[in-house]
Image (cartoon, rainbow, N blue to C red):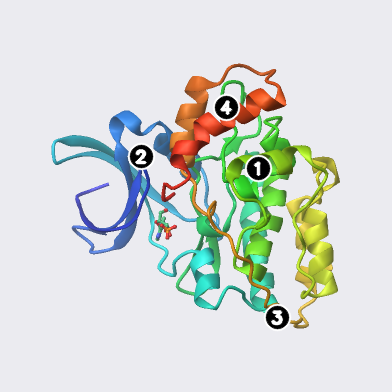
Amino acid sequence: MGSWIRGRTIGRGSTASVSIATDAQSGDVFAAKSAKLSKSEFLQREQRILSSLNCPQIVGYIGHDETTEQGQTLYNLFMEYVPGGTLTELVQKQGGSIKESEIRAHTREILRGLSYLHSRGIAHCDIKGRNVLIGADGAAKIADFGCAKWNYENCDGMAMSGTPAFMAPEVAREEEQGIKADVWAVGCTVIEMITGHPPWPELEDPISAIYKIGFSDEVPKIPSSISEELKDFLGKCLRRDGKERLTVDQLLKHSFLVDSTSKNSPTSVLDQDFWDSFEEEEEMERASSSRDGENSSVSERMRQVSCLRAPIWDCEENG
Ligand code: 3AM
């Protein structure tokens, strides 16, 4: 990477921030995600994963470097700049719900990106509206690989990560986090496109969310205002038993995505979005340094969760 100029910041987390950047020679615009070198372990992981990918439905990798700015050494990851904001913002701008034809298109794009990832043995582990960017052509691209994992990766000592409201039951129980959990999160993201909010709006905080998701026998409420095909599609993502969930390739053949006739546009608006943001990088750092071992009881797990997550609920997740 040659010389480049940092422009305005478009997102900020506790360890990484994203700015617009311009190539000094060509004038090309791209996005730079930067962290202090000493805190860049997760950004460097993201670089290793993103640099191995090339798919229109995944934010494009450009390169990386290190710079010294205001006396600090920074690690910078360069990506294509995706100008249309996040899927969450798109839904909010349209009043908290988008048409089924749009849900169909974006769900298809997300699943195509995931199909590419999963075929390479990679699970994203944090699919949600805020991690889906909208390109100049209106199509969705998956971003933020800060939590992604290779399936064969030994996860011992590596905390489960992601955003509570989008966590699959097996992730909430800290049993496993793989490609099946991405399918659950696709279901949650579809709920976000229908209602303008993550699933489980009735739960008041991340601890009760994790407890209910992990240890009850419930699934997120499926809005009644949607087409039968979309209800069926959601039902096939949101199976508590990961083995019963369809794969992304099976979902791509589901009648909701194949059938292009337009369906009713839902309007229900639910009222809670406190967990929309979540600082997973900091959480992963804290979690991996303070976990007590594999055989925690439920109450012990809840204690850990409350210790680990309480200080960061209010953080804006931008990492
Ligand atoms: O802070 P929010 O969630 O609104 O949209 C991304 C996110 O916005 C944006 O930076 C914020 C922190 O991740 N972002 C990330 N990567 C981007 C990219 N490649 C990007 N915006 C444009 N292009």
Mark 4 or mark 1: name the one nearer the start of the chain: 1
Mark 4 or mark 2: name the one nearer the start of the chain: 2
Q: Residue at x 65, y 34 (%)?
A: 151
Mark 1 or mark 3: name the one nearer the start of the chain: 1
Disc 4: which residue: 304
Which three-letter amino acid code belongs to the residue tagged 3? Ser
Distance, label 4 to label 3, CA atoms, is 41 Å
Of circles 1 and 3, the one toward us is: 1
Q: Residue at x 63, y 30 (%)?
A: 302
Distance, label 3 to label 2, CA atoms, is 39 Å
Q: Secondary structure at mark 2?
A: loop
Which three-letter amino acid code belongs to the residue tagged 2? Thr
Q: Position of residue 317 (x, y in %)?
A: 44, 49
Disc 3: which residue: 265
Distance, label 4 to label 1, CA atoms, is 13 Å
How dense is the environment of label 3, judged by Cα within 10 Å: few (below 14), some, or many (20 and up)? some
Q: Residue at x 45, y 29 (%)?
A: 285
Asked if disc 4 and disc 3 are in contact, CB closer than 8 Å, the reply is no
Residue 48 seen: no
Disc 2: which residue: 15
Which three-letter amino acid code belongs to the residue tagged 4? Gln
Of circles 4 and 3, the one toward us is: 4
Q: Please, is residue 303 above or below residue 319 in the view? A: above
Distance, label 4 to label 2, CA atoms, is 22 Å
Q: Secondary structure at mark 4?
A: helix
Distance, label 2 to label 1, CA atoms, is 27 Å
Dividing the picture into quadrants, the one containing residue 125 is: top right
Disc 1: which residue: 208
Q: Secondary structure at mark 3?
A: loop
